[in-house]
Each structure stands twice: as structure tokens, then as C-alpha cells.
Image (spheres, rainbow, N blue to C red):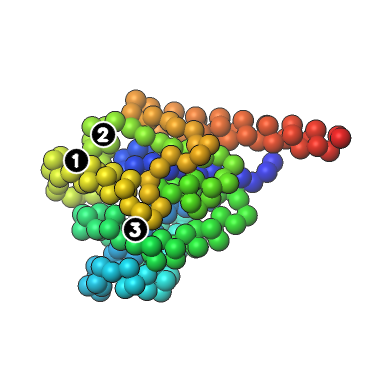
């Protein structure tokens, strides 16, 4: 079976990370959460009070050692050998990550790393520009969407589970602002990539989302096998 690349994009709260991780587990692939990489850069910059300029932030992104590790409890995010899995989900990081991820030098530094991680396929990578920029030739490209109200409730539930005290209005404002920011930025904006399969997750469970993506991957594999066999025959 060919090792393929599955690119999953979409706005905040659409279900990218959880779905992508489970798809990777089912296929025995490596899961790469690119959003965590941008959050790690943001955390490092906030800790060092780094000026929010393209050059300064680019230096931070280029200098950090960011490693994504798989554990029994889920993915661990290591930044310069420190476990920052929880720290990168703080409200402060969430409030600044869109600004940080819009800097061209930050994106270029991380996109280069992401491409190296997926060089040989066998990965499921999620983010906001995976199918459009990082891996435009990915064998399977997915674009997840969901109703804004549903996305707000999902993010509110996640924040509550982490012990954060944040109002529904604040979560809604964060999501709406990030949607607008990510979709309008000049560097790698959030768009549905050419050839991407759009899946509305509003009324779907995580298991249903996973099954839909696995079906698309299976369809690709079967088509690839037929085409390869036909090519060998002729």
C-alpha cells in the first residue's frame, strides 16, 4: 500500500486536530499538528517579550527546536526540550497566534520544517495552509467546516476542560476575529485548496468525520492501485 499524505485544513473549532490524530492512528501514520508549532513560536515570543515584527519573529521561529512526540495521552509538544503541550493552549497564546502566524518569515521557517517532516508520506497533517501551500500535491486533501455556533461551543468546552475561565462571548469573538484574520492575511491565507473535499462537521461525531476521511483515503488507494496495475500491463 502506498504511503500517502493527507492534508486537513479548516478554521478553528472545525475538528481538525482530533480528527487528524485519529485518522493517523487508524492508518498507522504520523500525525503532525502544525497549529501547535505556531503556538510554540508564539509562546516563546511572549515569554521573551519579543517585538511583534516580521524579522524578530522570524528569528524566534528559526531558532526554536520544536518536536512533536506521540504519547499514550496524546501528542506532546516539546520546545527546546520543555513540554509546553498545555502552555501553548493558554488564552494569551490563543490571542496572539493569528498575528504571529501571519508573519512571512515565521511561515517560511515552519513550512520548510513541515515539508521535511512529510517528505516520505505516511502522514496526516492539519492546519490552515496544508493543502494549499505546504503540500499542494497531497494525495488526499480535506477542508473541514462547521457552523460558528457549534465551533464556539466546542472551543468553550475545551477551555473549560483545561480549567480556563472564559465567557462564551469571548470565545465567539476569538473565533470570528481569527476567521477574518486568517482568511484575509497576505501570507498563506486560509482557503479551500484546489481538489480538497469539503466536509461539514456541524452535525457529525468525531468517529463519523474519521470514517469519511478514511473512505476518501481508501478510494484514492484503490484508484492508485488500478492505475498502477494498468500502467504495468501496457
Task: Please give the label number shown on residue 181.
Answer: none
x and y percent of residue 131 in the render? 49, 45
Q: Residue furthest right?
A: 234
**Left-right relation of 186 to 8:** left
State the separation of the CA atoms marked 2 and 3.
22 Å
Residue at point 40%, 33% (across, down): 206
State the separation of the CA atoms marked 1 and 2.
8 Å
- Residue 147's quadrant in the figure? top left
Is the C terminus in the top left, top right, bottom left or bottom right quadrant?
Answer: top right
Q: Residue furthest top?
A: 203
Q: Earlier in the sequence, mark 3 or mark 1?
A: 3
Residues at circles 1 and 2 in contact by the CB criterion of under 8 Å? yes
x and y percent of residue 209 in the render? 44, 32
Residue at point 19%, 49% (across, down): 163
- Residue 233's quadrant in the figure? top right
In the structure shown, which secondary structural element does the residue marked by tag 3 occupy? helix
Q: Which residue is mark 2?
A: 148
Task: Please give the label number shown on residue 101.
Answer: 3
Residue at point 18%, 50% (across, down): 164
Q: Nearer the viewer, residue 26 or 118?
A: 118
Vertical position of residue 133 compared to residue 58: above or below: above
Q: Which residue is mark 1?
A: 172
x and y percent of residue 111 in the render? 47, 59
Dot 3 surroundings within 10 Å: few (below 14), some, or many (20 or more)?
A: many
In the structure shown, which secondary structural element does the residue marked by tag 1 occupy? helix
Q: Nearer the viewer, residue 72 or 91?
A: 91
Residue at point 25%, 54% (across, down): 94
Residue 68 seen in this snapshot: yes
**Left-right relation of 39 to 142:** left
Amino acid at each position: 500500500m502506498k504511503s500517502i499524505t493527507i492534508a486537513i485544513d479548516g478554521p478553528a473549532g472545525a475538528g481538525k486536530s482530533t480528527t487528524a490524530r485519529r485518522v493517523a492512528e487508524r492508518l498507522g501514520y504520523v500525525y503532525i499538528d502544525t497549529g501547535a508549532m505556531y503556538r510554540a513560536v508564539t509562546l516563546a515570543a511572549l515569554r521573551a517579550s519579543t517585538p511583534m515584527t516580521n524579522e524578530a519573529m522570524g528569528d524566534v521561529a528559526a531558532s526554536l527546536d520544536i518536536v512533536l512526540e506521540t504519547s499514550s495521552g496524546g501528542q506532546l509538544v516539546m520546545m527546546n526540550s520543555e513540554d509546553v503541550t498545555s502552555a501553548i493552549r493558554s488564552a494569551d497564546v490563543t490571542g496572539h497566534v493569528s498575528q504571529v502566524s501571519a508573519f512571512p518569515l515565521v511561515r517560511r521557517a515552519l513550512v520548510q520544517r513541515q515539508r521535511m517532516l512529510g517528505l516520505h508520506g505516511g502522514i496526516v497533517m492539519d492546519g490552515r495552509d496544508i493543502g494549499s501551500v505546504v503540500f499542494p500535491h497531497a494525495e488526499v486533501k480535506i477542508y473541514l467546516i462547521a457552523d460558528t455556533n457549534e465551533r464556539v461551543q466546542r472551543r468553550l468546552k475545551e477551555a473549560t476542560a483545561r480549567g480556563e475561565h472564559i465567557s462564551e462571548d469571548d470565545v465567539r469573538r476569538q473565533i470570528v476575529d481569527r476567521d477574518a484574520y486568517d482568511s484575509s492575511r497576505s501570507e498563506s491565507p486560509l482557503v479551500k485548496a484546489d481538489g480538497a473535499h469539503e466536509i461539514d462537521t456541524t452535525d457529525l461525531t468525531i468517529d463519523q468525520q474519521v470514517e469519511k476521511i478514511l473512505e476518501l483515503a481508501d478510494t484514492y488507494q484503490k484508484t492508485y492501485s488500478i492505475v498502477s496495475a494498468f500502467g504495468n500491463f501496457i
